[in-house]
Image (tube, helix red, strand yellow):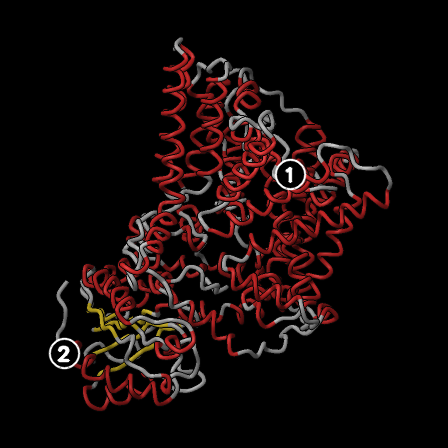
Amino acid sequence: MLFNSLEFAVFLLLVLLGYCAIPRRWWRGRKAFLVVASYLFYMNWNPFFGLLLLTSTLLDFFLARAIERTEPRARRKALLAISVIVNLGILGFFKYGNFVVANGMRLLGPWVNGVDPPLLDIVLPVGISFYTFESLSYSIDVFRGMPAYRSLLDFSLFLSFFPHLVAGPIVRPRAFLSQLAAPPVVTGPGVETALARIATGFVKKVVFADTLGTYVDIVWSAPFGYGAGNHLLAIYGYAFQIYFDFSGYTDIALGLAGLFGLRLPENFDRPYLAESPREFWQRWHISLSTWLRDYLYISLGGNRVSPARGYVNLMVTMLLGGLWHGAAWNFVLWGGYHGALLAGQRALFGDQPWRAGAVRAWLRRAVTFHLVCAGWILFRLGKLEDVWAVVRGLGHWGFVPSRAAGEAMVAVVLAFGLHGIARAPQARAAWTRLPAWTQGIGYAAVAGLVFLFSPASERFIYFQF
Amino acid sequence: MRRVIVIALSFVLALAAGAWLTVQSWGDVARFAGHKLYAYREGYRTMIKRFAPRYQRYVVWMGDSTIMGIAQPSYPQFLAPRLLDEGHIASQVVAGAAFDFYNYYFLMGPVLDLEPDLIVIVAHLASFNEKRGTKFTYNDLCSMIPTDELPHALRLPLAPRRLSAARLLLARLLRTEAGEEALYVTEGLRTLWADGAAWDVLGPKTPPPIIDWRAIYPAVRAYDVPLTRRNPTVRMMEATVRMATSHGRRVIVIGSPIPHMLMRERWWYDSAVWARRYAVLRAAVEDAGGTFLDLHEAITTEGFADAGGHFNEKGALHMANLLQPVVTKAIAVRATP
């Protein structure tokens, strides 16, 4: 069930009505209702997915309690190892099973020439990468000293809450579970902000991301046929497509959670204004980058080790971060590329603050943006021959004009402008200060716009990861 | 919370007023555009009607653009007069551009109502490739699934086509005269918006074609699809055949020819690998009670009009010659439910 679908609108309306119909004082009833609704939402993709989610939930809930009760560190470690192995095992089997088999077959090359890899009959469960990380972080937090939660209902809601279930943001257990202790207060201003976020998310997704996606698909489905003009537009287009797609989804998710009075973490902070690769990762997919930092990079020793080992840790973290995005070598390469950028920044500039100056800052932003864009080519194009076609295309000027190109150009220019100027929280605050009826009319206009643009609407990119 | 109520009310009122004004101003044009856009839907809804008397034997061809016979006749069009002359067999083609087994499944209900003696379905290998990038899903046809088939349908792999149990049920629920008209108007409005002359300032709607020999590359690469029984389209194929055979109809699925010589020349092709892939299709069809006819190497490059598996006259005639005895023989034996 996509957020931009009629069935989701019906689902949300029913869930809101049901939630409000349960008295606020019966908070457990409301939570149970949300868990059931979230499982229905998830199982609508495939009923089997619900079973997997339930497995992760039960496993980590009870393992975390066992870890908390256990005194000897070695036994605690063993229990944590079970959680890590089972969680990553499930993720690995469903997400990387075929990747491993196919690459194993390639390695065996000469002996199995001409034989299709015996692909496993696997359907990748939507959002498994997100909730596996959430579930794992709970076990690790409890191992590190956080008290285990007593309520299975709360823990189930933490993992399954439908706004963040399929594409994040990756929620931290403490931040979410602490909100479930008492019924959240749903205030008028809170709902207004939530509505503004949802509307923004829809515009980002349907008007910008999908318009840009149409053009990117045209050019990069036959990358050898286009010149530098088209490729540059496609590169900038994809940079903003993926940003608007994912941040649009996040806005909708945060807004939906807000309707129930719950808060989810921010995931983006105008990433293309970053002045360095490191700052980019502090602004892009924040919930993933902080997860990787806290649970992987620091666990490996972080930078409290020898400089050489620190670089290795950085590279391992980024390579695995790349692989998290999908079972394909281009994602690993993309992770490695960003690892190299981060390592390069550390080696060349260390942790020194940048020299001040507006011109210097904008130059650094431009360089960082283009470095990130180069990475997006690897990310988007699954095959190296296609990447090479783009690189070659950039080498000779040519531009094939079309309406899709014109639309993409307008969208890119608007995107650059909005990205550079608009500060989302302030804009939302200004919007919610407007008279209520003006907001209502504004949302009707947004609904009209979304309706008119939506035929081209595709699924959210991050649903695949 | 009073402000929220005012927001909700003004939203609903503004939306209703906007919709009313739009329908008043462009309703008729939009309805016309919608009907034109969904002509295929109306066609399948109203035109899948048996035109030959019940006593006459009847074959229905279900397929994609390779059998539509628009630019030039394809093999069902060549076969139709021959079958009629020689065996008094009437033929009907139910096909659409980029159709696949999802669409055949949606349309199988109305096709079964025709009470055909034989249903021949085209299995175009590229349609099993989820990455082939077609924009046409014809998901609206899902409302044509017969009610008694819904419990089976909900267990099928709907997600790859952005369908879900909820969507299927909603589509069934909205399958009314008013729902249908609303669809035409809304989709017509979107078309008017998307095709508006004002957009022309941004550039030509249809850009000049990209001429490069490698333009065939994505087309032939689409045939490189490792298949298992869990492939979503394979499962839909099995369900489609099973729906027909469980109603007592004979079904032949044709493993449609692919430009294998071109693939060998420009990409890669290994007969043994592709034979194994077609064996997967055969097993699925036969398990569902149908017959699989593997013709994937039946046509050489000279028989194709393009790399997308469309036939020229030579190829279509060759296919007709190959299929005539098969169809005649199959239709002679009536299946029992």
Q: Is residue A202 above or below residue B85?
A: above
**Which quadrant is the N terminus of chain B positioned in?**
top right
Q: Residue at x 52, y 42 (%)?
A: A319
Q: Which mark is residue B332?
A: 2
- Chain letter for mark 2, please: B
Q: Which mark is residue A281?
A: 1
Kindly indicate whether the residues beneath marks 2 and 1 are on one polypeptide chain. Answer: no
Tell whether A335 sits left or right of A362.
Answer: left
Tell whether A15 sits left or right of A219.
Answer: left
**Which quadrant is the C terminus of chain B positioned in?**
bottom left
Image-quadrant location for residue A215: bottom right
- Chain letter for mark 1, please: A
Q: Which mark is residue A463?
A: none
**Toward the viewer: B228 or A211?**
B228
The kind of secondary structure element at disc 2 is helix
Question: Residue A54, how many percent across, how many down?
Answer: 37, 30
Q: Residues within 10 Å of mark 2 (few under 14, many from 20)?
A: few
Residue A20 shows in this picture:
no
Which amino acid type corresponds to the residue marked 2 in the rendered image?
A: Ala
Q: Is residue B249 above or below residue A188?
A: below
**Toward the viewer: A6 or A327?**
A327
Q: Residues within 10 Å of mark 1 (few under 14, many from 20)?
A: some
Question: Residue B12, how many percent across, how many down?
Answer: 65, 43
**Toward the viewer: B93 or B182?**
B93
**Toward the viewer: A211 or A74?**
A74
Q: Is residue B201 above or below residue A94?
A: below
Question: Residue A300, how many percent across, how many down?
Answer: 51, 28
Residue A49 shows in this picture:
yes
Which amino acid type corresponds to the residue marked 1 in the rendered image?
A: Trp
Tell whether B304 sits left or right of B22.
Answer: left
Question: Residue B68, how many percent across, how many down?
Answer: 39, 78
